[in-house]
Image (cartoon, rainbow, N blue to C red):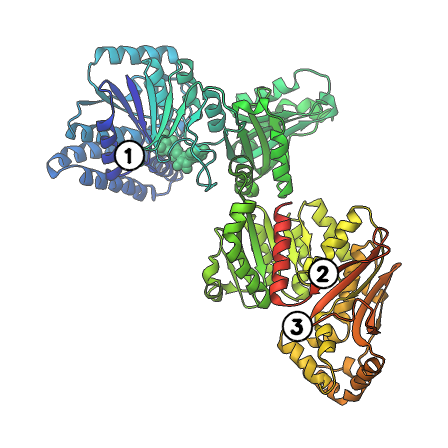
């Protein structure tokens, strides 16, 4: 005999029930079949709602009843020819009348007991089984309907009844021995107590009904037909990359289902496992998919089979010096919980025996607190233990695999992955069988944690990185262009899937958890929400996506002022905005410390020399033990452009204007011309060399007359350049007559930094610096004779974007 169970979605519509018939038609070999059905998907929830409303004295229960009736009527009308409909409809009405009477009674009394709720819930399966059996008969099967309440005997623990296997097995074997039909259709989930009262086996319990029957009749196989192609490596609703598991052991399936893999109801496995009957989970809507075969599996090499999570968890901690070395505390704790029928999902005890922590469903929290505090009232009064501590808003993630015990490093990988992404682990439990490692985390982190763990154990080497890009002007749009261009390469060669999950300019903000399509981002952004920095930050934090990176392409002080919020959420920051690193040393240091503490990257290579490897080179030197003696550099592409073009005949003003028009200056050219931009850069290099210096410590030998420095607006500034044209001509002539060139140079040595205009002779490495190029000379203990030179284009949107791009990759590969 074979037992097949069809779940709620599998019988949830006329089309689905038709599909069930197709599956049964194709089923080989011919033989006897017990078909266990769930209620039409969603019906049980509606029935519960109905009972609750009636119990609360709310008349809306009537409209919920009506919805239930309509749903079933529609299905019957769609499934059967008119001639067959009336008998079905009258059977339905009879059952629904009884249900309505029951609800009316509850409404009158204004109280819903667990006993009545079981009666109400049973109608879902009692009705669906009649519909499915009739449809099978219509299709030519000799199908008999049998009420499971006449076969499965339980205790009176309504809502979660315990099966009396002795009585049940006897009834089942006797029934099937005496009835020769080929097809039996039975309602799942429902059973009866010894006194005949209707009971239920717990939500999702139709699977269990099928397993009980399969075990009793020694079935060859138990099929669980559902709406997914088997048990998957994670819940597909939470992890879109989840993969079907073809083969899995009974123990692994039990662990996974116990820890939240809803695809199979946890108690289902035990009865069939005892008889070594294989369970095959199949997809009603894709029957050709292999699905998952649960049985004794042969040796496998990979350590982790699946991951899952349970929501709505509370932690209870019993703690106190009075517990150490005295036996019996845990026994009393568990007994107190057992008395209240509270299910313990998770246990961990510190080796000092100073505390014991258990995880339970949040719904049981208050009951548990009262029961435990009352059990330990005397010890609490004597201050030998503390009142029970409770924490809520938690969930559990569990990694399951028979082979974990033979593999080193599984828990290291698990906790490393969570830690690097700012997921705080509140408690850990690892069974001694090492088939399961579970961690309690905040409920807000569940989806992120499951995806991270899934990525680490099943998807390697593809790592998803989620970018939030602020500023999509010159540099930002180039960056997006480069990202789009390189997408394929990054996936194939580096195993990185980089998605832009959010972007903003000063007007609009746009988000997509699945990644914004980069071919058309401009258009989408104009339709985004109005930009507001505080909400932008909050939204990024709330999205809580794994491997998040905030990319700042703006020159805004406001944006620079929120980096710490990202870093302390484990979100990396990549920026070409110099403001944060050149602000107070304390803020710069704080950001660096936060990055270290929360395992995030804080990268700003493009703060100096655009895409040139100026900061990375310096970091490599310092980290490998070298010591910087001095730095001498031309760090302003804009000023270099200006002085390279300021040759005989050109006015200083026109050269500055040309530099601005070409995009080589900051939006406000005064920042470049005043030397402030160069000061910021040498400040950052000095800090990266290890000096704790401030902007005020830098000497600026400005070449601008006071009037230019004081100009209140950009337009006024240009005017003053004209007014002082002679001053600039004189600077040029002094240099040219000595055969030298003007360069704006930054220096750092022994904790002192300065910037200023300098005449350089033809034998100096700066003399031939062309266009907007930058050059940096590092003289260090290891590079004493000849400085280490970094030279090349130091400005421009393209090279800056590629520098940011490189930082993003660096942060992703951390
Ligand atoms: P049925 O009504 O057929 O019993 P359920 O809704 O009870 O179906 O269980 C199937 C659902 O379980 C799937 O649709 C899926 O969303 C969920 N699920 C949770 N974890 C897993 C997992 N690891 N593998 C497959 N499905 C899972
Ligand atoms: N109909 C019941 C429920 O929704 C049992 C089941 O579908 O397995 O919980
Ligand atoms: Mg189910």
Q: Is residue 175 left or right of residue 139?
A: right
Q: Is residue 531 left or right of residue 43?
A: right
Q: Where is residue 319 shown, x and y percent of the image? A: 69, 27
Q: Earlier in the sequence, mark 1 or mark 3?
A: 1
Q: Nearer the viewer, residue 102 or 451?
A: 451
At 37% from the left and 39% from the top, the residue drawn is: 49
Q: CA distance from mark 1 to mark 2?
A: 60 Å
Res. 580 mark: 2
Q: Which residue is mark 3?
A: 664
Q: Which residue is mark 1?
A: 11
User: Which image quadrant: the N terminus?
Assistant: top left
Q: Earlier in the sequence, mark 1 or mark 2?
A: 1
Q: Secondary structure at mark 2?
A: loop
Residue contact between numbered discs 1 and 2, judged by CB atoms under 8 Å: no
Q: Nearer the viewer, residue 543 or 105?
A: 543
At 68% from the left and 54% from the top, the residue drawn is: 603
Choose mark 1 or mark 2, whichever is in front. Answer: 2
């Amino acid at each position: 005999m074979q037992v097949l169970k069809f779940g709620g979605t599998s019988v949830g519509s006329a089309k689905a029930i038709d599909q069930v018939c197709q599956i049964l038609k194709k089923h080989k070999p011919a033989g006897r079949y017990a078909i266990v059905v769930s209620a039409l998907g969603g019906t049980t929830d509606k029935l519960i709602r109905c009972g609750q409303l009636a119990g609360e004295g709310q008349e809306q229960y009537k409209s919920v009843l009506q919805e239930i009736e309509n749903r079933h009527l529609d299905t019957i009308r769609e499934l059967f020819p008119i001639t067959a409909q009336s008998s079905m409809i009258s059977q339905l009405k009879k059952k629904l009348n009884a249900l309505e009477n029951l609800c009316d009674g509850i409404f009158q009394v204004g109280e819903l007991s667990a006993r009545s709720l079981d009666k109400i819930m049973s109608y879902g399966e009692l009705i669906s089984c009649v519909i499915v059996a009739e449809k099978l008969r219509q299709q030519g099967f000799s199908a008999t309907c049998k009420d499971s309440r006449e076969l499965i005997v339980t205790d009176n623990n309504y809502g979660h009844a315990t099966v009396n296997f002795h009585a049940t097995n006897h009834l089942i074997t006797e029934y099937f021995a005496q009835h020769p039909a080929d097809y039996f259709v039975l309602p799942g989930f429902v059973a009866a107590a010894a006194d005949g009262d209707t009971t239920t086996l717990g939500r999702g319990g139709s699977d269990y009904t099928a397993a009980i029957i399969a075990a009793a009749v020694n079935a060859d196989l138990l099929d669980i037909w559902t709406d997914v192609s088997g048990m998957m490596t994670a819940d597909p609703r939470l992890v879109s990359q989840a993969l079907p598991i073809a083969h899995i052991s009974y123990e692994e399936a039990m662990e996974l289902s116990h820890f939240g893999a809803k695809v199979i109801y946890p108690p289902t496995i035990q009865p069939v496992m005892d008889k070594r009957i294989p369970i095959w989970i199949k997809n009603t809507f894709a029957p050709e998919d292999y699905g998952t075969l649960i049985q004794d599996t042969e040796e496998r090499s990979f350590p982790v089979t699946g991951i899952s999570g349970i929501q709505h968890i509370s932690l209870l901690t019993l703690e106190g010096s009075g517990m150490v070395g005295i036996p019996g505390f845990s026994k009393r704790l568990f007994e107190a919980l057992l008395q209240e029928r509270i299910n313990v999902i998770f246990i961990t005890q510190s080796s000092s025996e100073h505390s014991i922590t258990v995880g339970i469903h949040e719904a049981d929290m208050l009951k548990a607190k009262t029961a435990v505090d009352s059990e330990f009232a005397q010890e609490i009064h004597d201050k030998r233990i503390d009142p029970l501590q409770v924490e809520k808003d938690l969930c559990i993630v569990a990694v399951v695999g028979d082979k974990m015990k033979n593999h080193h490093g599984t828990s290291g990988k698990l906790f490393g992955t969570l830690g690097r992404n700012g997921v705080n682990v509140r408690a850990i439990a690892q069974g001694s069988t090492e088939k399961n490692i579970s961690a309690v985390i905040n409920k807000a982190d569940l989806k992120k944690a499951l995806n991270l763990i899934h990525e680490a154990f099943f998807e390697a080497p593809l790592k998803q990185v989620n970018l939030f890009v602020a500023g999509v002007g010159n540099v930002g749009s180039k960056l997006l262009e480069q990202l789009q261009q390189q997408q394929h390469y990054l996936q194939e060669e580096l195993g990185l899937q980089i998605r832009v999950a959010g972007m903003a300019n000063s007007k609009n903000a746009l988000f997509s958890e699945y990644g914004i399509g980069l071919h058309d981002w401009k258009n989408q952004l104009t339709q985004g929400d109005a930009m507001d920095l505080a909400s932008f930050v909050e939204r990024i934090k709330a999205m809580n996506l794994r491997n998040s990176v905030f990319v700042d392409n703006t020159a805004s002080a406001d944006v620079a002022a929120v980096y710490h919020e990202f870093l302390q959420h484990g979100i990396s920051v990549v920026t070409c905005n110099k403001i944060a690193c050149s602000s107070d040393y304390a803020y710069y240091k704080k950001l660096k410390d936060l990055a270290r503490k929360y395992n995030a990257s804080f990268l700003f290579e493009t703060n100096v020399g655009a895409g040139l490897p100026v900061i990375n080179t310096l970091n490599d030197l310092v980290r490998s033990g070298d010591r910087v003696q001095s730095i001498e550099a031309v760090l302003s592409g804009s000023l270099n452009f200006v002085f390279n073009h300021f040759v005989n005949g050109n006015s200083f003003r026109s050269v500055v204007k040309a530099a601005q028009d070409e995009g080589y200056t900051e939006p406000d050219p005064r920042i470049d011309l005043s030397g402030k931009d160069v000061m910021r850069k040498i400040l950052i290099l000095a800090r990266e060399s290890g000096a704790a210096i401030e902007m005020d410590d830098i000497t600026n030998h400005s070449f601008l007359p006071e009037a230019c420095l004081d100009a209140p607006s950009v337009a006024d500034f240009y005017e003053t350049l004209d007014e002082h044209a002679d001053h600039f001509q004189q600077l040029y002539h002094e240099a040219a007559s000595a055969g030298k060139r003007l360069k704006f140079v930054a220096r750092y040595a022994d904790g002192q930094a300065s910037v200023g205009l300098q005449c350089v002779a033809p034998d100096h490495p700066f003399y031939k610096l062309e266009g907007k190029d930058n050059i940096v000379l590092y003289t260090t203990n290891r590079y004493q004779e000849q400085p280490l030179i970094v030279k090349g284009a130091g400005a421009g949107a393209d090279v800056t974007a590629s520098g940011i791009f490189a930082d993003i990759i660096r942060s992703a590969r951390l």
